[in-house]
Image: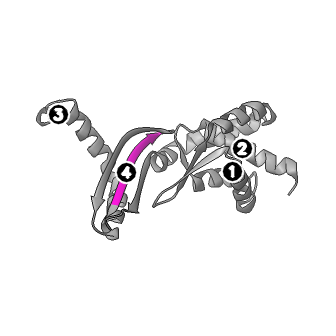
Amino acid sequence: MSSPSINLYKQIILYILHRSRVSLAQHLVIDTIVNLGYTDYINAQSALGELIVSELVVELDTYHRTYISLSESGEEALGLFIDQLSPDIRREIDDYLKNNHVETLDESVLISDYKLDADGNYTVTCSIRDRESVIFSVSISVYSEDDAMRVCDAWKTQSEPLYGEALRRLLGEDINNQA
């Protein structure tokens, strides 16, 4: 693969991450560049790998998947090279992200993971994020790995009601009078 090609793929990946409001599941970024027809899976993965190694992109590995976002140096690098990315490519990426926004947002905002602690229990950490900001986070200790996986899986459907209830209780609102 020629150097100009890999550089284009890197710029596209940086732009995708820049335009997203949230950290994205790694597969969504790769799928975007492949689905738009810019390259194949192997070349996209290679370009992403180089961005990670050069610390322009930050990885967050969780139980379910790997999320990626721009680092500060990634934002700076994109700022230096964004004019090299054609307006047509930027527009196509923007349209693709807009048309797939709900799917992207649903998979990216909710993050859950678990780790074995020193006591032999599993600590499950679940969060709602907007880019790198944590909007809501909860950690809970469970006795088995199966329970940890069940909590992680349940986070997808239970995060919003838990967040709402926690906020109402912490703000002292009467939850019995909520419609």
Name the side, left or right, on which 165 lies relative to 25: left
Q: Nearer the viewer, residue 40 or 153?
A: 153
Q: Secondary structure at mark 4?
A: strand
Query: Which comes sooner in the sequence, label 2 or label 1?
Result: 2
Q: CA distance from mark 3 to mark 1?
A: 44 Å
Q: Which residue is mark 4?
A: 126
Name the side, left or right, on which 111 lies relative to 44: left
Residues at badges 2 and 1 in contact (C-beta under 8 Å)?
yes
Relative to 173, does residue 166 appear above or below in the rendering?
A: below
**Occupied quadrant, residue 85:** top right
Q: Secondary structure at mark 2?
A: helix
Name the side, left or right, on which 125 lies relative to 104: left
| In magenta segment, residue 141 | no
Query: Which comes sooner in the sequence, label 3 or label 2?
Result: 2
Residues at badges 4 and 1 in contact (C-beta under 8 Å)?
no
Q: Which residue is mark 3?
A: 178
Q: CA distance from mark 4 to mark 1?
A: 29 Å
Q: Nearer the viewer, residue 15 or 142?
A: 142
Q: Which residue is mark 2?
A: 12
Residue 136 is situated, as x and y percent measured from the top left of the image, at 36, 40
Tell me where the magenta segment starts and ends, as one range.
Answer: 123-130
The colour scheme used here is one colour
